[in-house]
Image (cartoon, grey):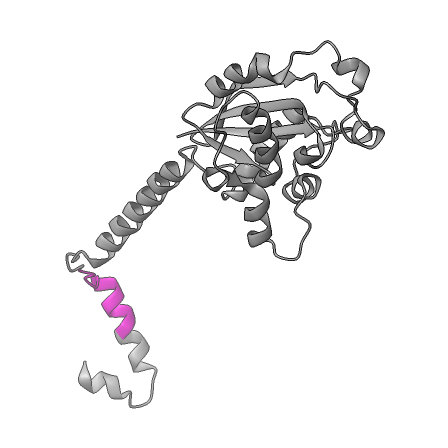
Amino acid sequence: MREIVLDTETTGLEPKDGHRLVEIGCVELDNHVPTGKILHIYLNPERDVPAEAEAVHGLSTKFLKDKPLFAEIYTELLDFVDGAKLVIHNAEFDIKFLNAELATVGHPGFKLKEAIDTLKIAREKFPGSPANLDALCRRFGIDNSSREYHGALLDSELLAEVYLELLGGRQHGLGLSAQGDSATGLENAAISQHSARQRAPREPRSFPVSAEEAAAHDALLTKLTDPIWKEVS
């Protein structure tokens, strides 16, 4: 199963207010395992980057001025994600920006309901606890010390690890369960063999008394006063 973990950075919170994409980062997963294939694009938003947005992602108007326009790279993005399920933290935010950009080039965009939203998964799994990416990295012991700013590619890479943990841990999808089943099978076989040995009938054992042992026993009896077992023997 092919999935694309995706993140974006923008000039603001709402495309309806004229805000645009400035960065897209994608990480490919195959059966929940990173393949090493990524897509990372900076974009010229054709407008200024507000100071509050730059404080979040560190991307300035000057830095983005010579970067490609969305219309120049959208086919590359669509080719990369083609046929894959999107995995996004707070999918509604990213998809509304992606779809706003895609609308400018006449593309119908992505369907929100088809994306996997890790924010919703985290809130359902840990109700009442912080569910932002930093909090989830701390919860799962994922090193995010290099995250001085929000960055689309870095956040996608971190989210890929978080997503794996949300699915049940690092052994998910890696074939370790099969290995565990094999080990359990060997253990059960050993127990069964042990039980079979315990149930198997044994040949009766004979412990004959030697003449010397019989004489010693008789000598002991003569020293006792009216031993009952002497009559029996």
The one nearer the camera, 207 or 215, is 207
Residue found 16% across the figure and 58% down from its top = 201
Task: Point out residue 164 in the picture as x, y percentages from the top left corner.
Answer: 53, 37
In the rendered image, which quarter is residue 139 located in? top right
Segment colored magenta: 206-217
Above or below residue 76? Residue 110 is below
Q: Examine the structure image and report whether residue 216 is included in the region drawn in magenta.
A: yes
Q: Examine the structure image and report whether residue 5 is included in the region drawn in magenta.
A: no
Picture quarter with the C terminus: bottom left
Residue found 56% across the figure and 52% down from its top = 125
Residue that lies at the very extreme toward the bottom in this rendered image: 226
In the rendered image, which quarter is residue 103 located in? top right
Q: Is residue 27 visible?
A: yes
The one nearer the camera, 162 or 103, is 103
Picture quarter with the N terminus: top left
The one nearer the camera, 146 or 83, is 83
Residue that lies at the very extreme toward the top in this rendered image: 66
In the rendered image, which quarter is residue 60 located in? top right
Residue found 59% across the figure and 44% down from its top = 119
Q: Is residue 6 visible?
A: no
Q: In this image, 147 relative to 70: left or right?
A: right
Q: In this image, 46 relative to 104: left or right?
A: right
Q: In this image, 17 relative to 194: left or right?
A: right
Above or below residue 211? Residue 222 is below
Task: Point out residue 72 in the picture as x, y percentages from the top left corner.
Answer: 58, 12
Above or below residue 199? Residue 117 is above
Task: Point out residue 11 in the picture as x, y percentages from the top left corner.
Answer: 74, 28
Task: Point out residue 178 in the picture as x, y percentages from the top left corner.
Answer: 36, 37
Above or below residue 20? Residue 13 is below
